Image (cartoon, rainbow, N blue to C red):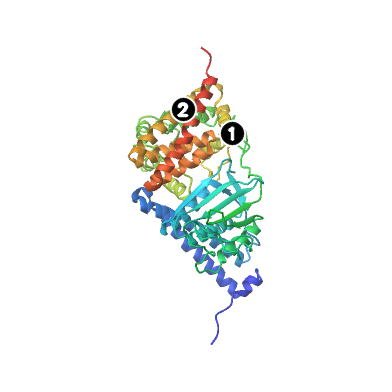
Amino acid sequence: MSSAPSLQPVFAHPGFGTPDEAALALLGHDLRAALSDVLGGLRLISPEDLPGPARLQVERVRAAGELLARLLEQGLTVMLGEAEQAPLEVVELRHFLQDIDLRLSGRASEKNLGFALNLGPDLPQRLRIDRVGLERILSNIVGNAIKYCDEGEVTCHVARDPGGGLSITVRDDGPGFPPATLGGSQPAPTRPGRPHLSGRSKSGSGMGLRIAKDLTARLGGQLLLRNPDEGGAEVRLILPPQAEPEADDGPAADHGHDMTALLLAGKRVLVADDNQTSQAILSSFATKLGGEVVVVDDGVEAIEWLTSDSVDLLIIDIEMPRLSGLEVIRILRAMPGLLAELPIIAATAYTLRSNRDAILAAGANAILAKPLLCANVFAGAVRSVLDGTAFDDSTPPLPPPSDHRLSHLLEMAGPQVALELLTRLIDDLHGVERGLVQGGAGPHWRLLHEKSHVLISLAGAVGADLLQHRAETLNQLSQHQDPARLSEALSGVMSLLDPLIQHIVQLRDSRAPAE
């Protein structure tokens, strides 16, 4: 009886045109196509049509599917000899960690465990790293912690390492590592009120930890294990220092677009956004390009204006009350005449692939990611929609460092507009604060969702990175209507929001002309 063909030659001699390699290539093609259909179907599901728990599960499946696609791609390229080593990617750290949180918190909740992701201050915004390798390390570390923990919680703390790199510490309330795993240097802990534990007792091969150690070595990092004195187990991943990937040189960077060219000279621009600060930024950029700017506060006003007067360009926020930007775009594209061909730029803080696909499918010509801090990126989008060429803002440029971001924003606005911008910013933040208080009293999920969405953009614009992250967490909780974590998330936002308002009030007062 003949045995099945072996795939060993593919691994031993990548690049050999063996029958096994050809078969694997064909199988890889079909696997990629099937997984693409699965992910495409997930992106077509509208979160608004689902109840809170179902929305959360769809997001978790989406995040896991994205990881599966990357694992499949990397595995096939290695097996087929298409790549000698894992590619390095520029990873948006905050979005990366949000996906990790979505996937792994689901595992923890299945065992009735708590899972908390905590971010330290001054984290890099981007890393250039083997993304799949880092995801596999964290999946194995946190997966092990959840596996061996029967009650309590698992925490993941991300911070700057004293050596200049990145430190990711995972702790659990399980029995701790056995002495053999620790190299015999530390005894297993004895917990108050519990019998002495000799180490992790559940059956397992230890494969996850070995995978994590191997991948950590490939990334040039360290993996440290210990049993804290108070009990449990701790794994600390230390990634080496690296220069943060540069994607922008600041507001004055050229990027091939000449901001002195009056791209919008003689053209009328309609800006539709319910956020006064965003209105001021977008209007300022459009005015500098020579445009005549009209501003409205929501989608209903946008439709009323567009159907009663002439406009050459629409810049529209996606998340607005009464009528969303997505609905406005669909209505316009279904109209007869010139409005169906109106150039449209969508501005949104939601830049996940599924959201971008939906916006483009509705008929937007270009997408700008909020917070928008670079005038040249704005000019690039305007040029593209007017010329009918492609514009890709899927990897938006880095804003200036957080401690200088507000200063750069005010410099871009100019001395005459800066004071008005600060006043609008204060009004917007006060409005967010009031809305969050009202929303938390219900809870009124829609109000919490709307106000946290506004806060994501505002905090990002002024460089309040920790507040931005907490606003994103609150936004997710409100979308999935998760009451268990609402109080903690809302308190975390409010503890940072009031000091930010006071800081900006002082800054405005210092710039106000003396009476």
Badge number at residue 426 = 2
Q: Which amino acid, by three-letter code, is at mark 1?
A: Asp
The x, y position of residue 260, in whole percent, is 59, 29
Residue at coordinates 45% horizontally, 44% vertically from top-left? Answer: 473
Farthest residue to the top: give it.
515
Q: Badge 1: few (under 14), some or many (20 or more) residues near its Cα, within 10 Å?
A: few
Q: Do the residues labelled 1 and 2 touch (CB within 8 Å)?
A: no
The x, y position of residue 349, in whole percent, is 47, 41
Q: How many numbered badges does the structure rendering display?
A: 2
| SS category of the residue bearing label 2 | helix
Q: Which corner quadrant of the image does residue 11 belong to?
A: bottom right
Q: Which amino acid, by three-letter code, is at mark 2?
A: Ile
Q: Badge 2: few (under 14), some or many (20 or more) residues near its Cα, within 10 Å?
A: many
Note whether 81 is above or below 390 in the view shown: below
Residue at coordinates 48% horizontally, 51% vertically from top-left? Answer: 101
Question: In front here: 109 or 89?
Answer: 109
Q: Mark 2 or mark 1, which is nearer the start of the sequence?
A: 1
Mark-to-mark CA distance, 1 and 2? 18 Å
Badge number at residue 215 = none
| SS category of the residue bearing label 1 | helix
Residue at coordinates 35% horizontally, 42% vertically from top-left? Answer: 445
Q: Which corner quadrant of the image does residue 245 belong to?
A: top right
Note whether 149 is above or below 13 in the view shown: above
Question: In front here: 148 or 199?
Answer: 199
Q: Name the residue under label 1.
A: 403
